[in-house]
Image (cartoon, rainbow, N blue to C red):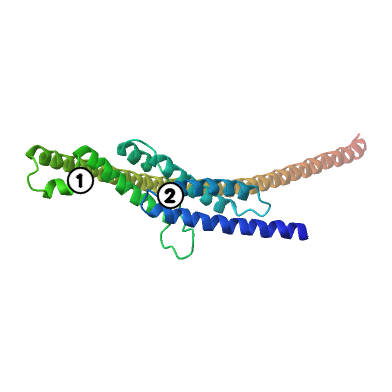
């Protein structure tokens, strides 16, 4: 019992330390990169090792909690790998495929920190990609005096392209929503039709059972009636035979007298 209690406490402390380190890593990811980059990378490596130990622990957390922990660690690892990519375009593309955590790590968080990190990183990568395309920040390019006309046109064209893609995404999302709504309506209609068919089939089966019971009753009555008819015929035949026999005997006795 003491041995099990020791391992239970150790697993509990291990999970608490893991949560503290995970919260620290999320805080570092929210800060500006640079001096804290190498610390974040080391912390994430330690997180990965603690997660492996936590999975092997006798008193490990629930499967759902382990899945959420693994999701957050994978997000931080993917974030570090995306930062090592050479171009802002590749960084932005890599960040699109990252999946942040779904639940807060600590109780005082209203929104999961990894989700906030994901949104900040996407915004930063989009800005860097835009600066790479324009050669400078889009806002400075519009407001700075003495900017060449070609660059201003490029900025306007880029805004138009981004707005076009945004409109396409909204239209695609709306089409998918309409498709899902139509699919739901068709599914409900099919369910109603199947339900009505099942009710009709059940009613037909009940009617068939009732008809079968009636047919069985009528068959029994007909059988009884047939038996009664046969019995009456048998009695009539017996009476006729008996009458004939008695008549013959009387005739034989009476006939010699007239001889």
- Badge 1, how many Cα within 10 Å: few under 14, some, many 20+? some
Of the pair 46 and 75, the residue shown nearer to us: 46
Residue furthest out toward the top:
259
Which label lies toward us, 2 or 1? 1
Residue furthest out toward the front:
35
Residue wearing tag 2: 100
Residue wearing tag 1: 137
Q: CA distance from mark 2 to mark 1?
A: 28 Å
State left or right for residue 174 relative to residue 247: left
State left or right for residue 5 relative to residue 250: left
Residue 161 position in % (x across, y down):
19, 39
Q: Quadrant of residue 83?
A: top left
> Image height check: is 113 above or below 48?
below
User: Residue at 45% across / 46% down in the picture?
Assistant: 38
Q: Earlier in the sequence, mark 2 or mark 1?
A: 2
Instruction: Report the number of numbered marks.
Output: 2
Quadrant showing the N terminus: bottom right
Asked whether residue 207 is in view, the answer is no
Residue 17 position in % (x across, y down):
57, 57
User: Residue at 47% across / 46% down in the picture?
Assistant: 41
User: Residue at 18% across / 46% down in the picture?
Assistant: 138
Quadrant showing the C terminus: top right
Residue 143 position in % (x across, y down):
11, 50
> Image height check: is 102 above or below 125?
below
Circle 2: element type: loop
Q: Which mark is residue 242?
A: none
Asked whether residue 187 is in view, the answer is yes
Circle 1: element type: loop
- Badge 2, how many Cα within 10 Å: few under 14, some, many 20+? many
State left or right for residue 256 relative to residue 216: right
């Amino acid at each position: 019992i003491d041995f099990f209690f020791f391992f239970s406490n150790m697993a509990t402390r291990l999970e608490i330390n893991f949560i503290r380190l995970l919260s620290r890593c999320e805080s570092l990811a929210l800060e500006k990169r640079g001096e804290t980059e190498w610390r974040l990378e080391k912390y994430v490596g330690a997180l990965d090792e603690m997660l492996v130990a936590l999975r092997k622990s006798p008193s490990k957390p629930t499967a759902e909690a382990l899945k959420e922990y693994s999701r957050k660690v994978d997000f931080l690892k993917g974030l570090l790998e995306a930062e090592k990519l050479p171009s802002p375009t590749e960084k932005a593309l890599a960040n699109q495929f990252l999946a942040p955590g779904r639940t807060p790590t600590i109780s005082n968080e209203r929104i999961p920190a990894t989700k906030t990190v994901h949104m900040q990183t996407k915004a930063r990568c989009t800005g860097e990609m835009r600066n790479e395309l324009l050669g400078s920040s889009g806002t400075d390019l519009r407001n700075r005096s003495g900017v060449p006309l070609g660059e201003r046109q490029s900025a306007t064209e880029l805004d138009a392209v981004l707005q076009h893609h945004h409109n396409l995404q909204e239209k695609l999302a709306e089409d998918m929503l309409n498709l899902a709504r139509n699919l739901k309506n068709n599914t409900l209609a099919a369910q109603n039709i199947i339900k009505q068919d099942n009710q009709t089939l059940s009613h037909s089966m009940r009617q068939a059972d009732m008809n079968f019971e009636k047919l069985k009753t009528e068959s029994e009555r007909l059988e009884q009636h047939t038996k009664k008819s046969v019995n009456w015929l048998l009695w009539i035949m017996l009476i006729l035979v008996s009458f004939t026999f008695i008549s013959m005997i009387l005739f034989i006795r009476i006939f010699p007298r007239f001889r």
